[in-house]
Image (cartoon, coloured by chain):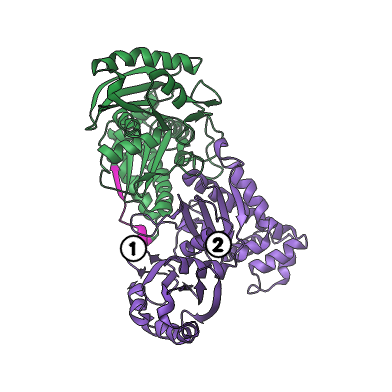
Chain colours: A purple, B green
């Protein structure tokens, strides 16, 4: 009897994977670096070597219903990763096919952010919701949109790229897409760092604890530490980040009217420092019929867990 | 046998209604003013007086399967119109219930823009599409979003208010919502008129045919006429309107990845003058995976027909 599934979360830097039982518990997990493999076949070989002993421990592949994979630009229709800017493997990578052949198990692929949303829906704080949006505030900004209990993938499988929506037309250039004023250029760990550098440069007269950090040390964590110590510029950075995020969330709410928006990822460690301005600016930019309705939540799942659980759930 | 349905489109100024046969043909139609009735019961009485002779002509209500109504802020879940800013009837209006009692026919309600999208899906240029967005560029900007062949209504029935999404944060104030920089403040007939007044005021030195119009005559039609005669400012107005609209459409595409966006309404009479800059700015603000994929179409249905057909289709 097939009682397990494999969940694999391919990130730009690290690939995390786990064996999930039918209760949605990760009973074993590990990770490998993603971008050390010039060709995808070597990456899959590496995964295989790590995973087979774990699989054998629970009785071999015959006990598995299949594999679910979340990956950047992963397409649920075709099972291919297409032109992912953060991965070494260029062009169209038939990852689902390659995995099926290697492991002899049916494999489903989706976008990594969508996989996290599925994990949240099955095991997290939106367990009983049919309409919600997840936003991952990490190095970049990822998103998963759920409408009527289903992930929105659009006509071609690529829907839900909310991090790349434009919120400041003509604004800050995105380092890798080149687009001007996208959400990701501001409301990500990278964006917070850039806002810090901008403000420190534009206001040389203003004292700040942030000036004690070298340019390399000036991370979103450093900004958080300084803000907690009452530093004015550091607090202003979170206020500004929350404003941009809140305005974007208001636009998303007026699109799909979700019951909740769930925030994941590194930046959420800032807690109320980020949540308060985000909520305030979201509400201020909503039509009255949407105001004071949308729950703004932090995920209760560990980010890695959500992605592994979500990926594994694709196959159930 | 029930072979007809009633489609009713309640607009801010005019209510249009028609009898639709099972082939999706409007076999009779008429209209009454919407905002002459202080209480909604008088409005329904008026509708009844106009409709009953039309209904009797095709054999009476026994031949009708039901009534579909499209209305601003119409909620498909509750059958109520809720706090519609452009209607005289304030608060929550149980229009579906009132119609059912008056006509003795089952009644379904939805948002007017959603009804138009249903009409387009059943009888228009998106007949075979499961993922598209309709945008009505009239006095205001309405929208209907279709994902997986279903209208997106969200957790509370109010999804799809794309005209109120913010595209110029801190920008032009919307006359009735007070919101700053929303799409509707620019890409509507009202918005085009305001852009004209702004540009003529800001550039007093620049000659323009538009200066021959009084402030009251300065409509979007006047701007179109002048643009067609080669007027620089008038052409710039459409370029600017298309830029704002195109940027907004790019954001919508990255949300739901539709196969097409269908434009309706008065402003579409401008044709290529509006379509070209809109398409250019949409493409320029899309991630590469979305570029050159989305069809940008003008509706093939008359606007009134789409709303009546769409409303009537709710009940089939």
In the image, taking residue A194 as reference, residue A205 lies left or right, namely right
Name the one closer to the observer, A107 or A272: A107
**Share a chain, discs 2 and 1?**
yes
Q: Is residue B164 magenta?
A: no
Disc tally is 2
Residue marked by disc 2:
A123
Percent position of residue B231, x then y: 33, 34
Per the image, label 1 sits on a secondary structure element best described as loop
Chain letter for mark 2:
A
* Residue at the (57%, 36%) spot, across then down: A288
Name the one closer to the observer, A57 or B279: A57
Task: For marks 2 and 1, give the one nearer the viewer.
Answer: 2
Q: Is residue B296 magenta?
A: yes
Residues under numbered marks 2 and 1 in contact, where contact means CB atoms less than 8 Å apart: no
* Residue at the (68%, 59%) spot, across then down: A271
Residue marked by disc 1:
A77
Range shown magenta: B288-297
In the image, taking residue B172 as reference, residue A76 lies left or right, namely left
Where residue B47 sits, quadrant-wise, is: top left
């Amino acid at each position: 009897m097939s009682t397990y599934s494999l969940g694999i979360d391919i990130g730009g830097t690290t690939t995390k994977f786990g064996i999930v039982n039918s209760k949605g518990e990760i009973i074993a997990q590990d990770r490998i670096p993603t971008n050390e493999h010039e060709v995808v076949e070597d990456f899959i070989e590496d995964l295989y070597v790590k995973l087979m002993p774990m699989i054998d421990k629970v009785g071999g592949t015959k006990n598995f219903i299949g594999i679910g994979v979340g990956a950047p630009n992963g397409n649920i229709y075709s099972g291919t990763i297409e032109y992912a800017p953060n991965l070494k493997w260029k062009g169209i990578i038939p990852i689902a096919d390659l995995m099926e052949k290697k492991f002899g198990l049916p494999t489903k692929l989706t976008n990594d952010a969508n996989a996290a949303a599925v994990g949240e829906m099955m095991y997290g704080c939106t367990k009983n919701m049919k309409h919600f949006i997840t936003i991952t505030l990490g190095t970049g900004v990822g998103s998963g949109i759920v409408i009527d209990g289903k992930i929105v993938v659009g006509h071609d499988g690529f829907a839900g790229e909310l991090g790349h929506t434009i919120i400041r037309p003509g604004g800050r250039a995105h380092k890798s897409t080149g687009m001007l004023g996208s959400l990701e250029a501001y409301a990500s760990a990278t964006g917070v760092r850039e806002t810090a550098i901008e403000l420190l440069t534009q206001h040389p007269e203003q004292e700040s604890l942030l000036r004690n950090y070298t340019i390399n040390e000036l991370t979103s964590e450093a900004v958080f530490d300084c803000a907690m110590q009452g530093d004015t510029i550091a607090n202003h950075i979170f206020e500004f980040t929350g404003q941009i995020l809140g305005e974007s969330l208001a636009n998303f709410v007026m699109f799909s009217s979700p019951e909740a928006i769930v925030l994941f990822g590194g930046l959420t460690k800032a807690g109320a420092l980020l949540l308060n301005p985000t909520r305030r600016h979201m509400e201020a930019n909503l039509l009255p019929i949407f105001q004071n309705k949308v729950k703004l939540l932090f995920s209760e799942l560990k980010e890695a867990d959500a992605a592994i659980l979500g990926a594994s759930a694709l196959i159930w």
